Structure formats: structure tokens, C-alpha cells
Amino acid sequence: MEIEQQGRGKAAYGAELLDKLSKDLTLTYGKGFSRSNLIYIRRFYLAFPKSETLSHQLSWSHYVEILKAENELGISFYTCQREKEHWSVRKLKRQMKSMLFHRLALSTDKKRVSTKYS
């Protein structure tokens, strides 16, 4: 592993593999398989390995934003809050940018923080 990576965090062939996979999938199936989209598809699979945990209320755009959360708790929090509050993608982005999850976790008055920003 160290030899292939030459002291780097990732091996160089991984980037080339994603680029090739992106081109092959695009040729076969059409748009939607950019390199960055493939990264989100992988994150999606890792975050939601069981299809019964998926919400049919969320769009792919919602999931892409939610997958930007730092950890599993954040992903779970924003997924549940989005469903509960029926946030649009724009509202979800705004809540994540304002770090609602972190502010609630640190707050002693969780009700006031959550009602102020919902």
C-alpha cells in the first residue's frame, strides 16, 4: 500500500479510475455520472446501506446536501429534520451553513434554538 501511494494519502490510480468510470458510465447511460457525482453516490451508499432507511420524501439534491455533514450524527439529524420540517433544498443548505446541528448540540436551551431557526 505504501509503495503504491508513495507516501501520499491516496494512490494516484484512484483518481484515474474515477475519471475512467465517469466516462464509461456517461457513454453507456448518459449524463449524471460526473466524477463528483460518483463520489456522492459512494457516500450515499455508505451512509444509507439499507434501502429501507431511505426517505422517499427527499430528492437526490437533498441527499447531496445532507451528505456534506461531517459525521453520521449530522447526516441523521439533517435527514430527520428535513422530513419533519419539510425543508426545501435551499432551507436545508441555510440550516447546515448556520450549523444548526452543532448549535443544538452545544445549547442548553434546545427548544429556543430549534424554534428560532425552523
Image: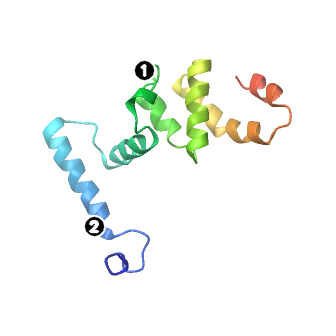
* Residue 95 appears in view: yes
Residue 21 screen position, x and y as percent: 22, 51
Residue 83 screen position, x and y as percent: 56, 21
Quadrant in the rendering for residue 110: top right
Residue name at image x 19 percent, y 42 percent: 26
Q: Nearer the viewer, mark 2 or mark 1?
A: 1
Amino acid type at mark 1: His
Q: Earlier in the sequence, mark 2 or mark 1?
A: 2
Q: Residue furthest left?
A: 28
- Residue position for label 2: 13
Q: Quadrant of the C terminus?
A: top right
Q: Are marks 2 and 1 in contact (CB under 8 Å)?
A: no
Classify residue 109 as left or right of residue 93: right
Classify residue 115 as left or right of residue 73: right
Q: Is residue 70 above or below residue 16?
A: above
Amino acid type at mark 2: Tyr
- Residue position for label 1: 56
